[in-house]
Amino acid sequence: MRIVVKVGGTLIAEPDIFTNIAQDFQVIIATNQCVLVHGGAKIVNKVAETMGKEQKFVTSASGFRSRYTDRETMEIFEMVMAGKINKELVTSLQSNGINAIGISGVDGGLIRAQRKGRIKIIDENGRKRMISGDYTGKIDEVDGNLLNLLLENGYLPVVAPIALSHEYEPLNCDGDRTAAYVARAVSADKLILLTDVSGLLIDDNVVPLLTAAEAKNEIDKIGAGMKKKVFGALEALEGNVKEVIIASGLLDAPISQALEHKGTVIS
Amino acid sequence: MRIVVKVGGTLIAEPDIFTNIAQDFQVIIATNQCVLVHGGAKIVNKVAETMGKEQKFVTSASGFRSRYTDRETMEIFEMVMAGKINKELVTSLQSNGINAIGISGVDGGLIRAQRKGRIKIIDENGRKRMISGDYTGKIDEVDGNLLNLLLENGYLPVVAPIALSHEYEPLNCDGDRTAAYVARAVSADKLILLTDVSGLLIDDNVVPLLTAAEAKNEIDKIGAGMKKKVFGALEALEGNVKEVIIASGLLDAPISQALEHKGTVIS
């Protein structure tokens, strides 16, 4: 079976998470081919702060909060995501006997995206306005060739959420959407989105099972952070991924537990 | 033909060097398989300074000056080498139509090294003493499998000089020695060491041609920085690389010119 796992940015900052995930992969990799996609926003913030570069967050007209990624922030984002978090994950997996290889979306032209450039935000006074100079991207395509080559040769690719624009600039991409497009590109059977809550909560309860149609209907009841995951899930399902599981990464053996449907299953 | 090119850390800080090298590779890649190994010490220093982490340099008992790489410095070194310089090189190559993929020595367990840990230095008073806590490595092996897989599938691997210790720690490796071991691992025909001088200078003249035996004889006349390159060259030749060229990276089309023996040829 092919499984794509995404570990979110809030989890990445948790102690022991790397070891926990690596040990879980030891079991899973024996009978499956896996790709790991990671976030790392909190660590980016921390390094940016040490470098004296204040991070700005903006709210889009559709209600999503995101990092305003100017050129200097993009350089820090890329350095931390591809050079620090990605390599720490790879080292942790390697030390558990898993032949991981870390790449970002610029490597092998893996992830191509449209640079947003100008984005419509809601400012602190509640007014809509356009801001420019943003280096975030909307993914057009993930090229499956490199990932398939690595998977077929026994490697576990670890992917940092950075894309290459059509003008060859590095871009900051949403981790959940990246994972969804990676899952499509490798024809994954399952996409697991690990986060710091137990699944999709509606009225404080974890929804165990949801069809794509139901997920679309419920979308307005869902908070902004989880909404990105549900959008990612829908994009994966539309690309023929069979099942998406949103689950807690804070449990022991979180991937194995997600495979046993502990969390929210969307299919 | 298989060619390994190393671009040194002083060159990496030069303007236009990335474009210059990428455009040269466009020509060379048409009929050869290539690997690029890079340094980046100057950029590491710059980022470390911005992060308020003072860099210490020590002189070994054998006269080599090197970075004292404590844990925190190693984290910065890895982040900058693998996440910034490596990815900027890949992006530049991609924008010139070359399918580059950036990896470090931890990826796929590519480079394994012995951690030095304790090193003998000469302190500011000229006294020899031991210091510990150093994360530098002496390379034991570069695994050719991953590089061969990528080369045979049309990729140009770009390698950051970081190794994995036998205790699974990331280590700072000398770029020239890294390039030499990479050249051995892929059975390279030629290793080109690009630097900011025109070749090996003895009494202010570029030595055009040198056998391995002659290089060994001349080693004591050579300054510390160039000595590392000559040691790298000898290691490559002992590993059946046919020819090593030490040449200037500041010329137009520096790789093509090195292939035409503009520089010092050791064989």
Image: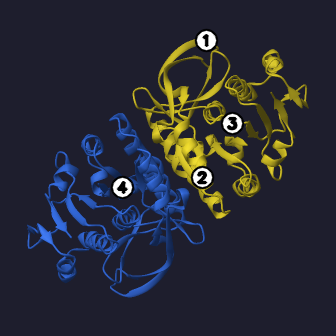
Chain colours: A yellow, B blue
Q: CA distance from mark 2 to mark 3?
A: 16 Å
Residue B38 image label:
4
Q: CA distance from mark 1 to mark 2?
A: 49 Å
Task: Please state the horizontal and vertical placement of residue A42, each as a whole percent of the image.
Answer: 64, 43
Q: CA distance from mark 3 to mark 1?
A: 42 Å
Q: CA distance from mark 1 to mark 4?
A: 48 Å
Q: CA distance from mark 4 to mark 2?
A: 24 Å
Q: Quadrant of residue A267?
A: top right
Nearer to us: label 1 or label 2: 2
Q: What residue sits right under mark 1 in the picture?
A: A127
Is there a contact, CB below 8 Å, between mark 2 and mark 3? no
Q: What residue sits right under mark 3 in the picture?
A: A188
Label 4: chain letter: B
Amino acid type, label 2: Tyr
Q: Quadrant of residue B89?
A: top left
The residue at the point 24 percent across, 65 percent down is B244
Label 2: chain letter: A
